[in-house]
Every structure is written in C-alpha cells, then in structure tokens.
Image (cartoon, grey):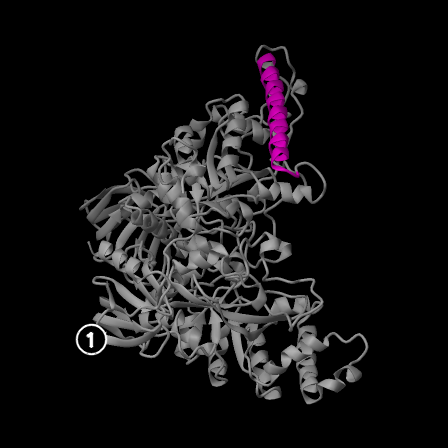
C-alpha cells in the first residue's frame, strides 16, 4: 500500500501501524492520534477475465514501445508484456492488428464532480472562497458521483483522475484520486491507498478574489505573506501534537491533554510530514521560484506546479528541485498570467530533464489528453527534439502517476501493476484515433461497440440523447 | 534540403508584394468535394489563384515553392472568433468583445476596435488561419452588435467587411440578459425587429411613435433594418432543440431574415427542420457534455448528423478565451472525421471536414472569392508539412492574397529566447 509506505512519520498517521487507529477522544490510557484516512475507499475492482491483446503496437508508459506488442491482463493486473505473451487456456484473445495499446490515461488536474455537468450554481462546489486558506475542505466531499463528465473522460481513455478544489484560495483544500469507475458514493470511486494532495494557488486568482473584498491578499506579496503565516501556524500545531505524543508515550499525558483538533492544520501538517502532496496552481516562472522558496523555508516539498505555462523559463530549476509541471499543450492569453504560454512548453520541460505531465483542468479537454500530448510532441519535434511517441506517452500516465504518488501501482504496463489499459483503433497520437475498449483493474469498463459497457449517469436518464455514443 | 529550398523561396517571395507564385509537387486539397490532386500545382498571380491542377506550365519569372511531400490547402477561415478584438481575455482593457453595461446594443459595431497588431492575429496566422469572422459577445441586450470579417494578413488593411452580421443571443443567455426568461427574450427580439421595420418605413417619425421608456434606441433600431430586410444575416445563438425550432419559426414572421444559427448543440434533434429552412450552422464538433440544461443532447455526432441531413455546417470558435484559438480548427475538423469510426456515431469525410474550416464558412458569410483553391479566388494558400487535419502537422508557408506571410509570432519569439537555458553573457531579456 503506497500510502502506508509514504507515512514514514507515523506520529500523526495512526493507521500506518497496527493495531488499528484510535481516533481523537479515545478511551483513557490510549494515546490520542489524528486519523489519516477517516473516509476510506470502498472501491472494489469489477470482475474481468484473463485477456491477451496481441499484434498491437504497445506504448508501455515507461518510454518503451513494442511493435508487435502484446499484453496479458490477469486477476485485475498486468501479468505480462512483450512482443508475445503466454496465452493460458480459456483466455480471451484480442487480435489487435493495426491497433494500439497504452496504459490508461491519468489526469492529475480535473474538476469533474466538483464542477459537474450541468454547470448550474446548485452544483458548483469547487471553490470554498470564504477564506484565502481553506485546507480543511476536501474535494471528495463535493464530488457528485453522477457527473456525466466521468463517462466522457472514460471514452477518452482516462482510468485515473485527481479531483482538485479550485484556485480561488491560496490553500484550496485536499484533492483526491479516483479510479474512473462510477459509484454511488465518492468513496466507491476512491483509488485505494492513494495519498491526498493539498491544492495551493499562486498569482491572480487569490489576490483578485480577496482583493475585491478589500482583504489580504490583494497582491502577490500578500499571497506569500498569508502562506508563510499559515505554514508557521501549522508548524506550531505540529509541535503541540509532537509534544503531547511524547508525553503520552512516557505516561505523563492523559487523553484529555491532547491538543484540540484543527482540521485545517491536520492537512498542513500532513504536508509537512510528507504524507500529503502539494499540487500548486502556478503560471509564472517567477512565482514558481517564490513558492519554492516558501517550501524550503517551512520544510515541505512541492510535488507539481499546475498550469505552469512558464515552466519552460525555469525548466532547469524544476529539474533540480524534482518538481513536476502539469501543463496544457497550447492554452494561452486567457488571462494575464497565461500570456506567455507557448506550444513548446511541455517538450522543453521534458528536454530539461524535469517531469512533464499533460493535464486538462477541463471536462472537454480531459477527453483528448492524448491529442494534447501529440500537439506538444509535434511542437518539440519541429524544434528538432526527436521526441518519440513512446516517450511522449510518459507525460500521460507514468509521470502523472508519479505526481500522484501512485506510480508503483499504475501508470505503465508493467507486470504487477493495475490492469488499467486502453485499446485504440489507431495511433493515439493521431487525430483520427479513439479508444475502443478501456480496462480498469482488469475489467472492461468501456467498450465503444457495446452499449452495455458504456455508463450513463443518473442525470442523463430520461433526457434527450441518452445512450448516444456521444 | 526541401525545407531549405522552401524557406529560401519564401524569402525571395517576401516582402509584401504579390509576386507570381507556383506551388508545385504537393498534394493539393482544394476543399471542393473530396478533391485531392497528387503532385499538383497551384499558381497564384496578382493575388489571385490563376490555376490549379496537374502538370501546369510554370509562368516565366514565377517564384517556385517546392511542396513535394507536403499538402496544400486554402487558407483556413474561422467561422466565428474574437480575433483582433481580444488580446488577453480576462484583462478588460484589452478585450473589446463584451460591452455588458453599454446602453447601446444592435448598433454596436466592432469594426473600429479591430487591431491588426494584436498578438493572436499572428499566432493564428502561423497556424494557417487567413480569414476570420469576428463577433461581439454579450451586450446589455440580446442584440450583441455587428460583427466583421477580417483578414489575418501581416500587412495592409485587415478589415474585409464591417457590419457583416448582427449577433443575437437567445436561449439561456438571451433569457438572462432579457430579464430572466425566454419569453422576455422573445419579446425583446420581436420588439426590436418590429421597431426596425417601423424605422425603415419612416425614419423621421420614429421618435414620435416610440413609447416612453422603450427598450430600443433609434440608432439600435436603425442597425436592425438591414437584418429584417435580409441585407445582412442574423447570427442567432441558440442550443436547445426547442429554441432552435422557435428561431426557425421567425422566418414565417420575418420572411426576409437570413438566419445563421450558432451553437445549435441539440441541432441533430431537429436537423430536418434546419435543413428544410436552408439555415446554415456555425458550431464545433467536440461538444458532448450536458453542461447546461439547453445542451442535454450534446454529442460529437451533432455535426455529422446535421451535414447528413443537408445542413451547411462551418466551424467557429466563440466565447471567452477559445475565441483566440482558431489555429485549432484543423484539430476540430480531424476529430469530426474520427467520429465517423465510432459505432453509432456520425462524422464527416475528410473533404467535408476541410470544407467546414474553409469553403463552408466562406459560403455561409457570402465570401464568394474565398474558401477553395479554384481559379479566380483570392490567393489564400497554406502549405502544410503533413495531413492538414493531423495533430503533428503545421503550416510551413502561409499566403494571403498571394503574399507570403511571416511565420513568426510573439510565441515563437518567446520560444527562441528560452530554448537554451544555459546562462549567457547577459540576461535572457537581451536575447532577441
């Protein structure tokens, strides 16, 4: 379990060790601790059959290509990949001549469920824009599992997606990682064991939203000042708990001596302890360096800058710091901080040795992340970079998996990883390609030719066009 | 080698004079039907296409562009955009597409606001877009104002046709603007048209017949006269099937109206009615979310089904930041082709898809000498390094009225400044 492995500092993450967690306010004699996973995943993989896809061109997600290539999916996992794979008796064999196989696409930046379709005010739940710091809110508690957008993303080959709060706040709240399999609750969709993230934001949005209310922050310097105070307060909170835990273990503190829980600071302390990953909305290069400075000052790590339209200006620094950039292929000019967007951004970040990710931030764009990667690859190649498709595919699955702390479990077609696979009717870097089938944990969750394998959200029942292949 | 040859030839073809040009050896997609001429030649003389075909005699003195292994198409035409009136969408000082608190409506004319030097013009020109329909967005009234047709040329006057159409918001947006309901929007619309007719009958008597507190001003009524008289089209935004049907019904009341529907995401539900009314549609093929209650039936098959029913569909990008991304028209067109492969889906042929970003928008807006590679048309030609609808392809040469266009933009300059991050003798700001 990746999450448990990440919880190196078990101090506040009681579930990292056996016996099972004691929640705050446990019985006398116990050591009170902060539960790390109070809303656990109830996701269960759906049944699949042993399946071999052969004769395909396979991009494995790690940067390798097999042509011809074959993949065996067994017991919900990738069992084998190669030019040929063993075919057990009774297995389903798909001859995929002329077709392509890839790992499922992973979108590290989605607002499906929190800004669902239809986009009416009553369903708009992505920004708790009532204070610049709202690390206490969790996107999963806004996710509407009936968002029709999940089905559209699935038809685009998306098997895992990270749902983030919006960027009105400096601290937007926790993001959550979902398998793209519909459920009755968000917990039914949660990627088991995936770490949480904390959404942070630089720049125009927080200063505009709060500046308009004549309160801090109304400037970029205000953004940083507010953030520093929040991290300082979180450090104080952490020391209180460390102190209490030390005393409780020594038998000198009662459960009632435990500090008062501050739900907001629980999240910030999770970041300081390395258990919660920072996903940082940030467009401009100079602001990225400010955010890196703040991370150094308070001792946390930024996992990824999102939108990151100016990463190409500081790609060397991002490589050195080990920070991913989650980017669009060609968005520019829709706001001042996106004015310097260029089509070569993703390729230049990759070339500098930094982690490049293609993201959507958009219910329509998420359906064609492969095409965004194709545009970015082409732009890089026009500069003479010689980027191969198998290399570009790392931007779509393995790198976002790294950015979400789930790379040991999905993101590439390697034996033992989750059976998250897409079969394309043509090269997915071609505009003419579409997913034919999508497997998630070894189950066929989408089939373009089988209506019984195409989900329809509750909202769409009884509506015009329902059941259309869309 | 070939690329060097091409660039050299282009340098010779510059600067901005319309020399005689022969583009040879490429696959020529004329945007007429499915025509694809292998090893074709396009000759452009005096800014116009002189001839297109195989084995043409190259005129003496012509600049020859070797397009072997490349594709040649007409310049792309954005069926709707914000090009020239929107620099940074969220910076209001640079965005002339919206006038939400203006006391005027139909009379708003975007033509004087068009800025040939706004950076999205060059950014999209490099992407092969040579002409664009430019529309206002919302005004304080359902009549958003008069749009224009522009050229994306780097030199000369880019305003091709001012006051080319009136943009009208109906559906949910129109309802909101009009005070909160569709019936209120319809009342505004009918009132505007009726007042325009009254103005046309007797301009001098207009004020005396105007009710006190009337919603329509003299200048706005006057601007609606050519709309009700059918001299300029009414581009009407509506999405829901019932709204589209209601808009078509206007033709009974105002028979001279020339309606162009924009949006029409549920158009496929009433495709036969739209076709029977001979009303064309400007939309995009990638809408498939029920992201409002007026777009519940959205599907990427909408365009394919409309075209199959006989509706002329051109692609245009409108609204917000996407209004400056006309360079993605080929991506839209390519995806419309892909939709044809989906079981149960409806898409376009490659010829239809190319036409949707060239010939059809030209036809819809009455640009008779644009949109195809045919003798006599304006010399808007793009040479691509691959299948023009493919994601990996890009223009290597763009001609507008026979003039070779610069292939640089603010974005290529940013790219070149930061392509090498190794420290230099001076800061990056000195690299230019």
User: How many neighbours does mark 1 have within 10 angstroms: few (below 14), some (14-19), or many (20 or more)?
Assistant: some
Is residue A236 on the magenta stretch?
A: yes
Chain of the residue under the numbered disc 1 shown in the image? B
Q: Residue A299: percent from the left, percent from the top?
A: 52, 23
Q: Residue B384: percent from the left, percent from the top?
A: 30, 61
> Would residue A249 appear left or right of B42 to someone viewing this image?
right
- Residue at 46 percent of width and 82 percent of height: B275
Q: Quadrant of residue A80?
A: top left
> What number of labels is visible?
1
Q: Quadrant of residue B178?
A: bottom right
Say above or below: B322 vs B197.
above
Closest to the observer: B228 or A418? Answer: B228
Picture quarter with the C terminus of chain B: top left
- Residue at 37 percent of width and 44 percent of height: B416
Give the magenta part as a residue range.
A218-247
Closest to the observer: B315 or A425? Answer: B315
Q: Main secondary structure of the magenta part?
A: helix
């Amino acid at each position: 379990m990746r999450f448990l492995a990440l919880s190196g500092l078990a101090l506040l993450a009681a579930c990292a060790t056996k016996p099972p967690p004691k929640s705050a306010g446990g019985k006398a004699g116990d050591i009170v601790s902060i539960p790390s996973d109070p809303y656990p995943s109830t996701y269960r993989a759906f049944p699949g059959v042993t399946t071999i896809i052969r004769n395909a061109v396979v991009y494995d997600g790690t940067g390798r290509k097999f042509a011809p290539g074959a993949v065996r999916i067994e017991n919900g996992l990738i069992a084998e990949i190669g030019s040929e794979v063993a075919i057990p008796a009774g297995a389903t064999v798909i001859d995929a001549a002329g077709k392509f196989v890839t790992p499922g696409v992973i979108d590290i930046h989605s607002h499906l469920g929190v800004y669902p379709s239809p986009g009416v005010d009553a369903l708009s739940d992505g920004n708790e824009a009532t204070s610049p710091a709202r690390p206490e809110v969790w996107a999963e508690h806004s996710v509407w599992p009936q968002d029709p957008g999940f089905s559209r993303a699935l038809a685009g080959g998306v098997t895992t997606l990270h749902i983030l709060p919006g960027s009105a706040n400096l601290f937007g709240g926790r993001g959550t990682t979902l398998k793209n399999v519909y459920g009755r609750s968000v917990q039914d969709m949660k990627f088991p064991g995936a770490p949480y993230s904390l959404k942070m934001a630089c720049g125009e949005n927080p200063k505009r939203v709060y500046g308009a209310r004549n309160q801090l922050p109304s400037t970029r310097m205000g953004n940083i000042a507010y953030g520093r105070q929040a991290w300082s307060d979180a450090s104080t909170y952490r020391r209180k708990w460390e102190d209490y835990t030390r005393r409780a273990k020594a038998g000198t503190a009662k459960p009632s001596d435990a500090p008062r829980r501050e739900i907001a600071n629980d999240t910030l302390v999770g970041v300081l302890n390395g258990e919660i990953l920072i996903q940082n909305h940030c467009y401009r290069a100079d602001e990225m360096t400010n955010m890196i400075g703040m991370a150094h000052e308070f001792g946390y790590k930024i996992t990824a800058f999102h939108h990151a339209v100016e990463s190409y200006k500081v790609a060397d620094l991002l490589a050195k710091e080990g920070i991913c950039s989650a980017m669009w292929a060609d968005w520019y000019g829709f706001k001042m901080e996106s004015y310097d967007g260029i089509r070569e951004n993703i390729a230049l970040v990759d070339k500098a040795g930094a982690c490049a990710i293609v993201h959507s931030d958009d219910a329509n764009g998420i359906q064609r992340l492969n095409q965004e990667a194709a545009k970015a690859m082409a732009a890089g190649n026009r500069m003479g970079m010689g980027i191969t498709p198998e290399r570009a595919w790392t931007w779509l699955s393995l790198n976002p998996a790294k950015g979400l702390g789930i790379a040991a479990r999905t993101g590439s077609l390697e034996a033992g990883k989750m059976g998250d696979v897409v079969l394309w009717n043509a090269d997915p870097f071609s505009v003419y390609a579409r997913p034919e089938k999508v497997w998630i944990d070894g189950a066929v969750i989408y089939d373009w030719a089988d209506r019984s394998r195409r989900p329809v959200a509750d909202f769409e029942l009884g509506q015009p066009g329902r059941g259309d292949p869309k | 080698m070939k690329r060097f040859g091409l660039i050299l030839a282009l340098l010779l073809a510059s600067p901005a004079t319309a020399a005689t040009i022969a583009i040879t050896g490429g696959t020529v997609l004329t945007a007429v039907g499915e025509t694809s001429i292998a090893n074709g030649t396009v000759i452009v003389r005096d800014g116009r296409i002189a001839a297109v075909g195989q084995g043409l005699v190259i005129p003496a003195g012509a600049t020859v562009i070797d397009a072997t292994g490349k594709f040649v198409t007409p310049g792309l035409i954005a069926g709707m955009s914000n090009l020239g009136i929107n620099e940074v969408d969220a910076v209001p000082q640079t965005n002339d597409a919206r006038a939400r608190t203006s006391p005027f409506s139909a009379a708003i004319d975007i033509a004087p606001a068009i800025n040939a030097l706004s950076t999205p013009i060059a950014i999209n020109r490099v992407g092969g877009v040579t002409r664009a329909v430019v529309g206002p967005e919302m005004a304080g009234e359902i009549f958003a104002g008069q749009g224009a047709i522009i050229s994306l040329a780097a030199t000369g006057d880019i305003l091709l046709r001012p006051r080319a159409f009136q943009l009208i918001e109906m559906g949910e947006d129109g309802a909101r603007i009009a005070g909160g309901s569709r019936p209120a929007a319809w009342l505004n619309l009918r009132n505007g048209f009726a007042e325009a007719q009254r103005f046309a009958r007797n301009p001098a008597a207009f004020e005396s017949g105007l009710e006190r507190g009337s919603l329509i001003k003299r200048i706005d009524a006057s601007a609606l006269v050519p709309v009700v008289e059918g001299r300029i089209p009414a581009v009407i935004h509506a999405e829901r099937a019932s709204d589209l049907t209601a808009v078509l019904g206007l033709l009974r009341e105002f028979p001279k109206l020339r309606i162009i529907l924009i949006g029409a995401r549920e158009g496929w539900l009433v495709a036969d009615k739209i076709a029977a009314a001979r009303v064309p549609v400007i939309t995009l093929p990638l809408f498939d979310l029920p992201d409002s209650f007026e777009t519940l039936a959205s599907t990427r098959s909408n365009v394919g089904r409309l075209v199959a029913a006989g509706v002329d569909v051109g692609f245009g990008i409108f609204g917000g930041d996407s209004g400056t991304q006309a360079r993605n028209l080929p991506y839209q067109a390519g995806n419309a082709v892909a939709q044809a492969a989906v079981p149960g889906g409806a898409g376009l042929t490659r010829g239809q898809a190319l036409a949707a970003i060239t010939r059809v928008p030209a036809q819809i807006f009455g640009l008779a000498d644009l949109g195809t590679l045919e003798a006599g048309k304006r010399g808007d030609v793009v040479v691509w390094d691959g299948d023009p609808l493919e994601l990996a392809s890009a223009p290597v040469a763009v001609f507008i009225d026979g003039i070779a266009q610069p292939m640089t933009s603010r974005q290529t300059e940013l790219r070149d400044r930061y392509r090498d991050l190794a420290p230099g003798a001076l800061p990056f700001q000195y690299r230019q």
